[in-house]
Amino acid sequence: MRILTVVYTLIALALLLSFPEPASAHLVSTRFGELYSGLIHPLTALQHLVPWLGLGLLGGLLGNRTSRWVLLTFPLSAGAGALLAGGLPATAAIDHVNLFSFIVLGLLVALSVRLNRPTFLGLTVIFGLSHGFANGTPDLSGVPLLLYAVGVLLAAYVLIAIATAVTQLVSQRAAWGTIAIRAAGSWIVAIGLVFGGYSLTAGV
């Protein structure tokens, strides 16, 4: 019940943040638009939302000790990637890495592969940087860019925390839990193949 309460609260918060901000002449409200943008953007983009869920599912299957580390490494890497995007040119290689993350994370979940901690954390850093970079924007600099990156970091933390917690709860308390999680991994692979095929052929 506590997890459902958290989920419902976050959904309500996301809906509230999606409404246009009222105009204000007070300086206290002039620099939070970038924070909200960074928070909402990855949660409303399929190419980020699904692999992030896959990473959370994988972390949950690997147990408490490993999943606790991903709560630190992935959000920090995503925030760092968003910061880097403010000073580096965009590249198609980043998009290819992110599409690849669908397949990799989905297969690892579907096959319930028991990765060791260094390998898993290496994946979280690589995909954190790549997805964070793809969420970044070259139009911002200074304080606005920092606030935007913090928003991306918070989005990564919230999503990974919920996904890992739900995965551990389901897999440990229900006999069918692990099977359901692995089935979700196969759906992530399927979504990645469809989305990747569409993305790669859209410009042809």
Image: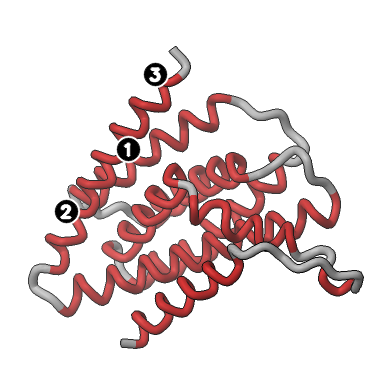
- Amino acid on which disc 1 is placed: Gly
Disc 2 + disc 1, Cβ < 8 Å: no
34 lies left or right of 15: right
At mark 2, the secondary structure is helix
Q: What quarter of the picture does the C terminus occupy?
A: top left
Residue in front for this viewpoint, 187 or 14: 14
- Amino acid on which disc 3 is placed: Thr
Quick check: can you spot residue 113? no
Mark 1 sits on what residue? 192
Q: Is residue 101 above or below residue 167?
A: above
Q: Percent x, y for residue 111?
A: 18, 48
Quick check: can you spot residue 90? yes
Mark 2 sits on what residue? 183
Q: Residue furthest bottom?
A: 1
At mark 3, the secondary structure is helix
Mark closest to the chain's N terminus, 2 or 3: 2
Residue in front for this viewpoint, 99 or 15: 15
In three-dimensional space, the C-alpha distance between marks 2 and 1, rounded to whole angstroms, equals 14 Å
47 lies left or right of 59: right
Q: Is residue 145 above or below residue 163?
A: above
Mark 3 sits on what residue? 201
**Badge 1, how many Cα within 10 Å: few under 14, some, many 20+?**
many
112 lies left or right of 135: left
Q: What quarter of the picture does the N terminus occupy?
A: bottom left
In three-dimensional space, the C-alpha distance between marks 2 and 3, rounded to whole angstroms, equals 27 Å
Q: Percent x, y for residue 33?
A: 74, 61
In three-dimensional space, the C-alpha distance between marks 1 and 3, rounded to whole angstroms, equals 14 Å
Mark closest to the chain's N terminus, 1 or 3: 1
Mark closest to the chain's N terminus, 2 or 1: 2
